[in-house]
Image (cartoon, rainbow, N blue to C red):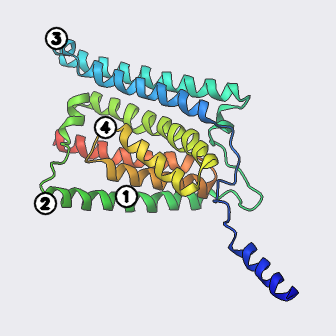
Amino acid sequence: MGRRSARTTAKQVQRKPQPRKRIALVRPWGWVDVVWVAIVVLIAKVLNIFILGNNFTALMPAEGVVGVRIALLIVLYLLILMVLAYRAHCRNLSFMDAYRLRGSNDADRQFMPAWKSVLLVVALFFVLRTFAIVYTYVTAELGWVTPSAAGLTDLFSPTLFGLAAAVLSIVVLAPFIEELVFRVVMFDTFAQKMSIAAAVVLQGLIFSLYHFSLWAAVPNFLLALACVYLIQKCRTAIPAIMLHVLYNAAVVAAAFYIAMT
């Protein structure tokens, strides 16, 4: 009888539900930080859409419109950076440490060497670009109208000046800020409060919605998954930023190549 009860107790212990796996590395972010950055990013996005779509730009010469758009984008990105720096200051952390811009070692995982990180970034970039090409072809065959490359060159003008502006805002500033917002502040907070799988999916969905493009929702979601994987694998946000930069650079290069040839 004693043995039976012992076996029953052992089985009950084994069947006891295990706690959901959460992110191992404790980060300083919380819901207050998520709300802060979400509000600022949303305001910047709405202002960007409203001002760029306002009729007053039609009264300006083409060069003036491009200049206004570039200045606006830079100001909005700087505003987001200021808020990120302020939140790091509130936590008594340097900007580099707060946003994983330096490598870190955990008790069970070591910082990945730079050459391995670069190879991983390149491999994921080719996977994502291959998917994007196939996705574009399939959606076109299904009659789903794909975004025109002319939209990007219309925004910045198909000139060398417009190309430089697009590189500064879309290839440099946007990936850097978006990785800190979505893959560091938001993901780290979500991963402390829920399972890692749920945190990955949630930040990916928010990232896709942020771009206000139904067609690009799937590629953007996959990009978000790849960037989270890189940050967790490499223990720093730098490889994720590199991947995002390459991804956006390919889009900008294709758009301006078509417009300028």
In 3D space, how far apart are the residues under numbered discs 3 and 2 (Cα atoms)? 39 Å
Give whichever of discs 3 and 1 has the lower sequence position: 3
Give the left or right position of residue 174, taking residue 90 as reference: left
In 3D space, how far apart are the residues under numbered discs 3 and 1 (Cα atoms)? 40 Å
Q: Amino acid at mark 2?
A: Glu
Q: Amino acid at mark 4?
A: Phe
In 3D space, how far apart are the residues under numbered discs 2 and 1 (Cα atoms)? 20 Å
Number of numbered tags placed on the structure image: 4
- Tell me the crowding category of disc 3: few under 14, some 14 to 19, or many 20 or more residues within 10 angstroms, Cα based: few
The residue singled out by tag 2 in the image is 141
In 3D space, how far apart are the residues under numbered discs 4 and 1 (Cα atoms)? 20 Å
Q: Which numbered tag is attached to residue 59? A: 3
**Mark 3–mark 1 contact, CB under 8 Å?**
no
| 54 up-or-down from 116: above or below | above
* Nearer to us: label 4 or label 2: 4
| 229 up-or-down from 203: above or below | below
The residue singled out by tag 1 in the image is 128
The residue singled out by tag 4 in the image is 212
